[in-house]
Image (cartoon, helix red, strand yellow):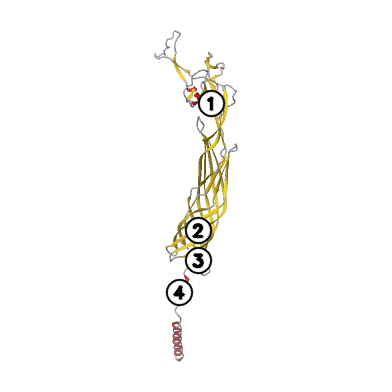
Amino acid sequence: MKQFRLALIFSVLALRAAHAQRDSEPIPDFTNLDEFIYEPKTTLTLGVRSLSGAKTSFSGQGLILSPDVAGNATDSNIPRLYHDGDLQPDGRGTAVDNGDGTITFVPITPDGKTNGWGFLDDRQATQFPGYIAMHDYSATITDVRARSRDGQGSMGVELAVARDMGKLFNTRFTWTLGGGVTINDINAASNDKVRANINTITDLYSLYGELAPAGPYDSRSATSTVVVTDGNGNPVLNADGSTQTVTTDAAVLLGNTPVQRITTSTTDDTSVSHNSKLKGAYYTFRAGPTLWMPITHRFRVSISLGATLIYAGTNYTLIQSFQPETGAEISETLESDESKFLPGYYADATLQFDVTPRTGFYAGAMFQSSGDYEQNIADGAGTNYSSKLEFGNQSGFRAGMTIKF
């Protein structure tokens, strides 16, 4: 029993000592919790970047060939195609009944004329009275001027990421290191009249004393309806009492070989036009440091300078067209595609308003300059043109929002 009492006393003393020790432990200090809060170091920028258009120049010379086949000046009764008319072999003849239910077509003895022809314009009949003038046209562009154009400015999407690198030399200035990408359009055009030599082949065909029909005229649709008469000149009637009629060829006959061929070449500044278009897009990749200076609690300004790499892709379309004196316009369309990488540099100046410690809005001015490249277009028949696209000294503005994370 005595031993039990001693054990109980020692137990109570041990519990009191343990409780006293627990009461003496210090309470943790939670007043400096800000030291453990994460501070965002990365900034995502999303906005627009408007740039002045790249400078463009167009130059070159070419041929506009005739799409027609006039043939030589000596062959007779052959198909001939002109820009303002055509001739086909003579189609006159007689249908002969063979007596067995079949009919044979017997051409007439050639007389140097044809009933298969047509023309478009009355001037073809009045240019040389008594003849029909058929023309074959082509043009040789001799204009050597380069036509410069400022491309249209474009609004592009800007996406960039920057990393906070801390204060600069223990001053109020901070700096970041980042990179981004922008995409903008390319759109330039030139539409001008150009100097050219107009080459004309004129073939004259005789009307053999007949009056020229009014143009446009196609002898193959020239027919007339004649009443059938008997030997006494009386109309022949059908079974139903109606008058019998037949359709006959009423074509004005034309010589089927040119009487004369005239070839001329004149210099012209108004008949040939040149329409060049350059369309595409370019990506601007950029990277470099940015220096920040606080103005107030919410406003900051920055200056950025770095390197750029432009990747440009363009489609060059050329339409050269020629309006001859008679007939429809002659035109030719050529295209080519090109893409290039061009290094350069950029500089930005920006004002930013911080809405919260993590978000803000910015606006500023920018400048960038890169190289240039040429794009050629040709048809292999004497037409050779080029365009030059220059990305030097482009300026514009940028605006958008920032998010820190």
Residue 348 - label? 2
| Earlier sequence position, callout 4 versus callout 1 | 4
Q: CA distance from mark 2 to mark 4?
A: 39 Å
Which residue in the structure is indicated by mark 1? 134
335, 58: nearer the viewer: 58
Residue 174 - label? 3
Q: Are marks 2 and 3 in contact (CB under 8 Å)?
A: no
Tell me which amino acid carries mark 1: Met
10 Å crowding of disc 1: few (<14), some (14-19), many (20+): many
10 Å crowding of disc 2: few (<14), some (14-19), many (20+): some
- Percent x, y of residue 305: 53, 59
- Percent x, y of residue 235: 42, 11
Q: Are marks 4 and 1 in contact (CB under 8 Å)?
A: no
Residue 32 - label? 4
Q: Is residue 305 above or below residue 215?
A: below
Number of the front mark, 4 or 1? 1
| Earlier sequence position, callout 2 versus callout 4 | 4
Instruction: Specify whether residue 310 is in view.
Output: yes
Number of the front mark, 4 or 3? 3
10 Å crowding of disc 3: few (<14), some (14-19), many (20+): some
Q: Are marks 1 and 3 in contact (CB under 8 Å)?
A: no
- Percent x, y of residue 297: 43, 66
373, 224: nearer the viewer: 373
Q: CA distance from mark 4 to mark 3?
A: 25 Å
Residue 122 - label? none
Number of the front mark, 2 or 4? 2
